[in-house]
Image (cartoon, rainbow, N blue to C red):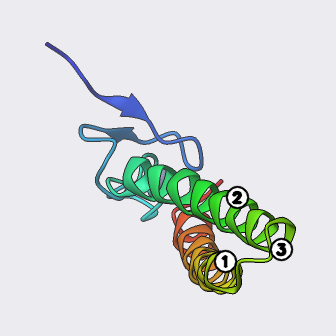
Amino acid sequence: MDQSVRCPKCAAEVSDPTQPCPQCGYVIEHPQRKRYQRQVVASGVTVLLGYALGMTGTATRLDVLGIAGLVMGFVGGVWLMVSLYLLLRTGV
Ligand SMILES: [Zn+2]
């Protein structure tokens, strides 16, 4: 099976799209890209859950829930930033 593709930057033939183009070094399909995309989604969900937990804690006046939500939202936020940064480094 012929899996070779053309580099979108210099039009050279690249046999493996997860490897950098031998002509110009352009990475067509970053091997870690899918993993980073999943991490962005997972961390986004963590932020939302933390927010929901914090809101629940505030509404029910349970400080423990509020603090847990705050920590979860903060950790999720940092994680989201890191995943987004890594994802953007693989090219958009
Ligand atoms: Zn190229």
Q: What element carries label 1?
A: helix
Q: Which residue is drawn at 42% across and 46% down?
A: 29
> Label 3 belongs to which residue?
58
Distance between mark 1 and mark 2 Cα atoms: 10 Å
Quarter where residue 53 is shown: bottom right
Gap in angstroms between the C-alphas marked 2 and 3: 15 Å
Which residue is farthest top?
1
Reading the chain from its start, which is encountered first: label 1 or label 2?
2
78 is higher (above) or lower (below) than 25: below
Q: Position of residue 20 (x, y in %)?
A: 35, 59
Q: Residue, x 62% and y 68% (percent of image)?
A: 84
Is residue 18 found left or right of 48 in the rendered image? left
Q: Mark 2 points at which residue?
A: 48
Front residue of 92 and 74 = 74
Residue 8, position in %: x, y?
Answer: 57, 41
Name the kind of residue labelled 1 in the image.
Gly
The tag earlier along the polypeptide, 2 or 3, is: 2
Q: Is residue 18 left or right of residue 59?
A: left
- Which residue type carries mark 3? Thr
Taking the spot 51% from the left edge, 51% from the top edge, the residue there is 37
Query: Which three-letter amino acid code belongs to the residue tagged 2?
Result: Leu
Tell me which residue sits at (57%, 51%) in the image. 41
Per the rendering, the mark at residue 77 is 1
Front position among marks 2 and 3: 3
- Quarter of the rendering containing residue 74: bottom right
Q: Which of marks 1 and 3 is nearer the N terminus?
A: 3
Q: Tag 2, which secondary structure?
A: helix
Q: Distance between the residues labelled 1 and 3?
A: 20 Å
Q: Residues within 10 Å of mark 1 (few under 14, many from 20)?
A: some
